[in-house]
Every structure is written in structure tokens, then in C-alpha cells.
Image (spheres, grey):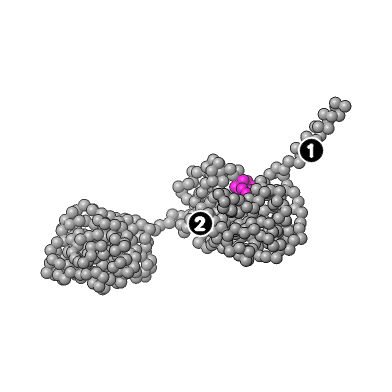
Amino acid sequence: MILKKHLTISISFFLIISCVKDKDFDISKTKCSELVYNLSLINLNTITEGDITQVQEDIIIEGYIVSSDIENNFFGTIHIQDKAIEPTTGISFLVDLRDYYLQYKLGEKVAIKLKGLYIAKKNNAFVIGGVFTSFGNQSVGRLPSLQVQEHMYAICTNQTAKATKTTIEDLSFSMINTVVELDNLEFIEEELSKTFANEKEETERVLKDCLGNQIKLVNSGYADFATNVLPNKNGNITAVLIEDKNELKLKIRTIADLSFNNNRCPPIVTEFTSTAIFFSEIADPNNNTGARFIELYNSSNESLDLNNWKINRYTNASTDISSSLDLTGYSINAKSTLVISPNKDEFITVYGFEPDISIGKNSVADSNGDDNLVLKDPFGTTIDIFGVIGEDGTNTNHEFEDGKAQRKETISMGSSTYMFNQWLIFNDTGSSNTTNTPQNAPDDFSPKVR
């Protein structure tokens, strides 16, 4: 009897062990439901205007599962897009269900009974699930695991969800909770020695394309691949598009969603030189020092990037730079201007619109009319100059105190030496070659007009 008892226990234990599912085992065959949807995902706004709502009607929706927790990068959220191919929208279903990939296959079609579930619009997409209450406020939370199978059913079909091929530039909020595919991406240089995620911590890594567009990849610190070092190649990524703090981001299901085997993008060269950019107006209004400004003009037929361009100011007779402005991050459109102000609020009050750049007092744009200005390209070459370095402008042909220095309209390129005959100079005490007529803002000035 004792032997039989031990044998029974051993057999029972073996049966229990043999039933445990493992990621390497085949996922159990799906039981098919014949539920028919009566509301499309695109029309969920007919249920709620955005506030949390418990569905009371017998509403059934359908879609295709595009997320998976098979490698633990997703937790508690199932993302569902409305169509297998070329989806128009998607939702997220919050569930307190671990290893949901065992019950709901990646890519398969499902029907969801909404009655009894809670729904709300979170930023730009709908979320469904149970209810969560904190400090008297309700929000959509994870649906208990035993209730998930009472609401979501597999629908047998030959179709499975396919990724939408797109680019970083073409991603939109309408694509949230859908699966997308992007080519020619790579991790930025600053992160190449890092792992996908910090231990036990949600981590963002930055991807870029060969045009310099960037997007963040969100990785869980509990993901199976969290400790893998980021690939240093270029390639293809398939991922779920999610929204976080009103920003679009990517999230992969498995490490196999990445295929980075190509050479990295060639360096993007944004530094260039051109004499088509030059000073077109420099202002020191007689009636308002807060309305001072510098205007640059681009005479070319294309937009020009000002990466690593600089304006240097030399105060009075100084040969040392007193202030400098790095123009990185700005560009000038073809046949257009760039206006720089030391006092944004006063500029708006006087001229009625915002300057392109506002930089504060004692800056390059805050000259009192006897200083000298130099425009430098990224390679240190002087492209344009106003005044004579080392010479105080007072009583000279480059004084614009209480007035302005305006480039003649016939000038179409900068000059590395000061050419008085290219300018119309107005001031209070300049040399006889200038016009000793102080100028008042706004009438005597024309920022943004060449």
C-alpha cells in the first residue's frame, strides 16, 4: 500500500510538471468564436467623449493583436489594431494577465465584448479595461485575469496583422496601438555601448534615420533582452507605436523585431559656407533702446542651415569679442530674413510680431551704435562685417547710434571687409558721409522686410 501511494504521488507530480507551459513549447491551439462585431474601433467615440465610461450596451468590437509579452517587454497591456492590413486606428486593453501570449496569439483576430468594461480616451487613443480608483478618482485599470477570457475571444481567420511600412516623418497619432515597420534606422552614436534597458527600469533609447529624424524606443528593464548591447548597425525595425506624454514612441515585442545588419548612415553634413547670408539691417532706435535688433538676409534661392555659424560683437575699439551668438539650430529660408532681438516683449510691442531669436541685454543685438559686428561661417571664415575691428564707431562712417545701418537693396552677398558704399547709415553724430538724422521706432525701421 505504501508503494502504491508513493507511485500515485510520483505520477501526479509528473503530470503537473508536464502541463507547465514554457516559451519554447507550442502555444495551445486557439478555440474559435463566432462573435460578430457591431461597432468598429474607429467609432468608439460614439460610446464616450473621452471621460471614463462603463459600457452598458451589448457592444462587440474586433481587431488584431499586435503586441506580445513573450519576452516580457510588454506587461499588462494588449495592443489591438482595427484591420489586419492598413489599419486606421488601434486601442490598448489593460489586463492583469501574465503570459497572455499563451492565450492570445500575436497577429490573430479577436472579438471583445465591451459590456461591463470601462473605456476612456487617454490623450489621442482609447483604452479599455477594468476600473481603478485613487483618491476618489476613477480611471481605466487592468481587468482581472479571470475576467479577460469572458470578454475577449479569438476569431478564426486566414488573415493576421501586418505591419504598416512607414517612416519616422510619416508617423501620426492615428497610428497609435498599431504595428509599424521602419527601414534604415540605427541607434544614435551616444548610446551604442549601452544595453537596451537599465536593470529593472523602463529605459528609452534613441533611434535615428539617415536624414537625422529621431524616435525613442521604449524597453522594459525586465525584458529578456534588457541586458543585450544595442546593435551598432543600421536596419529594419517592426514595433508597436505607442504614445507617452503626447509623444510617439516605439516598443518591440521580441529582439527578433530588430534586423540591423547594414552599414550605418553616412554622416550628415549640415555645415556649409555661403556669401548669400549677410547683415541687412542693424537698429538702435533713438526713442527706444528695447527695440534694437539685427537682421540677417539670405539672398539665395534655397533655405540655408546656420549650424555652427556665429555673430561676434566687438564693443567700441576693442579687438576682443565682447559677446557672441551661436546660430546653430536656426535656418533662413530663401529670399528671407532672420531677426535677432535683445528684448522680445518690447520688440513685439513696438513692431507687432515676434523676433526669430531673442537673446537678452548686452548681447550681439544690443549695440548702442558704435560697435562692430562680424558674421562667421562654421569654418571660421568672415562672411560679412559691419564696422572696423579696433575702431570705435563714434564720429565715423560706421556709427549708427540712435539710428540704423541699412544694407542697400542692390547688395546680394556679404563682404569680408567693411564697405561703406554698401550701406545707408543714419545716426546722431556720425561722419559727414553718413546721414545725421536719428531714427525712431517703429516708423523708421523695417525688420523682416528686405
First-in-chain label (2 vs 1): 1
Nearest the viewer among 381 and 188 is: 188
Asked whether, in this view, residue 59 is left or right of residue 293, the answer is: right
Looking at the rendered structure, the kind of residue marked 1 is Leu
Q: Position of residue 358 (x, y in %)?
A: 32, 60
In the picture of the structure, the residue carrying the numbered disc 1 is 15
Q: Quadrant of the N terminus?
A: top right
Which residue is located at x 52 percent, y 57 percent? 248
Q: Nearer the viewer, residue 32 or 255?
A: 32
Q: Amino acid at mark 2?
A: Glu
Q: Main secondary structure of the magenta part?
A: loop
The answer to whether residue 76 is magenta is: yes
Q: Residue at x 64, y 53 (%)?
A: 130
Relative to 81, residue 233 above or below: above
**Few, some or many C-alpha atoms within 10 Å of disc 2 (few <14, some 14-19, many ≥20)?**
few
Q: Are marks 2 and 1 in contact (CB under 8 Å)?
A: no
Q: Which residue is mark 2?
A: 247
Taking the image as shown, residue 30 lies to the left or right of residue 351, namely right
Q: Quadrant of the C terminus?
A: bottom left
What range is drawn magenta here?
69-80
Q: Residue at x 19, y 53 (%)?
A: 319
Q: Is residue 73 magenta?
A: yes
